[in-house]
């Protein structure tokens, strides 16, 4: 019998690799960065005449940072469209149905760009097929757009391999809250001690899955030092195909 009856995976930089270089370039404060905001300009200026786009960009940055700070105390997920609603009101638009429609439009553009910057490598897809042939697999992701999260998996040809797909915006709680792990395990019908979790974030993935009672493989592609003060992972791998031996499946010959 396999050591692990089920394997759960994180999405970004675990199953799918995220390439920020695919995002538009923007220059601010003398520095050039990759962000989604340039692609939002046309829709914003068409609907919010009289409000400078720079004010929107500043509001979006402020709201995003406030949201990240709030996650340290409250692990409830905030939908992408809600973040844009808050941004538009902060930028000077009224709280109205029209503002909410614009927020939904901007959120769709933003999330689509994030989605196109994430790709499931062919080697990952082949590995997942081999794992799923012998045991159920599931996905547990912190992401504020469930539709785009599933589109990433579908485009990579792996969506149908996952018995359960749990994305924080649909579930309500974000990793490292143990509830998002526990509910996924319940749907699989597998006890935490019989499951392995693989993810790249020490705080979200490793600490959260360990607290939920699972063994954890830390995906450490950049060979970073594991942060002090956190429960260490059980295994360290550069990518998910490197788990083949641990899971007692045939390694990829290609």
Image: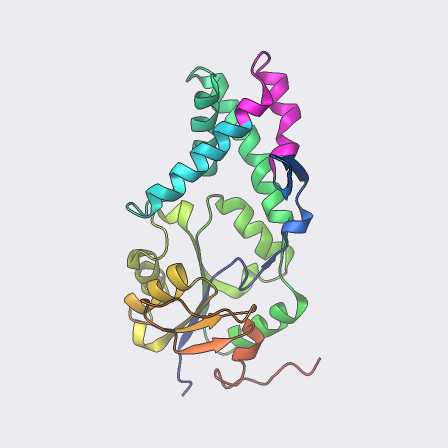
Image location (x, y in percent) of residue 20: 63, 50
Name the one closer to the observer, 185 or 197: 197
**251, above or below 140, in the image:** below
**Farthest residue toward the front?**
30
Q: Is residue 212 visible?
A: no
At 53% from the left and 57% from the top, the residue drawn is 12
**235, above or below 149, in the image:** below
**Farthest residue toward the top?**
50
Which residues are the magenta region?
Answer: 36-56
At 36% from the left and 73% from the top, the residue drawn is 232
Image location (x, y in percent) of residue 130: 57, 77
User: Is residue 171 on the magenta stretch?
Assistant: no
Image location (x, y in percent) of residue 15: 55, 63
At 32% from the left and 70% from the top, the residue drawn is 231
Q: Is residue 118 visible?
A: yes
At 30% from the left and 62% from the top, the residue drawn is 182
Number of numbered discs on residues: 0
User: Is residue 51 on the magenta stretch?
Assistant: yes
Left or right: 181 as drawn, with respect to 224: left
Quadrant of the rendered image containing residue 122 = bottom right
Left or right: 175 as drawn, with respect to 151: left
Quadrant placement of the N terminus: bottom left
Name the one closer to the observer, 171 or 91: 91
Left or right: 234 as drawn, with respect to 237: left
Task: Name the image colouring.
Answer: rainbow
**103, above or below 154, in the image:** above
Quadrant placement of the C terminus: bottom right
Image location (x, y in percent) of residue 72: 32, 48
User: Main SS type for the magenta part?
Assistant: helix
**25, above or below 173, in the image:** above
């Amino acid at each position: 019998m396999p050591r692990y009856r089920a394997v759960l995976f994180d999405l970004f930089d675990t199953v799918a690799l995220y390439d920020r270089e695919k995002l538009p370039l923007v220059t601010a404060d003398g520095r050039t960065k990759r962000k989604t905001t340039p692609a939002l300009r046309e829709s914003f200026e068409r609907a919010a005449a009289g409000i400078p786009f720079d004010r929107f960009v500043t509001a979006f940055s402020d709201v995003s940072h406030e949201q990240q700070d709030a996650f340290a105390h409250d692990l409830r997920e905030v939908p992408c469209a809600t973040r844009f609603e808050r941004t538009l009101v902060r930028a000077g638009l009224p709280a109205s149905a029209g503002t909410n429609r614009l927020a939904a439009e901007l959120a769709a553009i933003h999330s689509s760009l994030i989605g196109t910057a994430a790709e499931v490598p062919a080697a990952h897809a082949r590995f997942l097929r081999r794992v799923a042939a012998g045991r159920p697999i599931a996905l547990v992701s912190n992401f504020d757009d469930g539709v785009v999260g599933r589109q990433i998996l579908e485009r990579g040809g792996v969506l149908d391999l996952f018995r359960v797909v749990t994305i924080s915006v649909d579930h309500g709680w974000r990793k490292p809250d143990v509830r998002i792990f526990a509910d996924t395990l319940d749907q699989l019908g597998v006890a935490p001690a019989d499951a392995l979790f693989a993810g790249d974030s020490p705080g979200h993935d490793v600490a959260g899955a360990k607290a939920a009672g699972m063994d954890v493989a830390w995906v450490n592609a950049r060979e970073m030092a594991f942060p002090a003060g956190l429960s260490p992972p059980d295994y360290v791998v550069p990518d998910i195909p490197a788990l083949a031996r641990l899971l007692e499946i045939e390694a990829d010959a290609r």
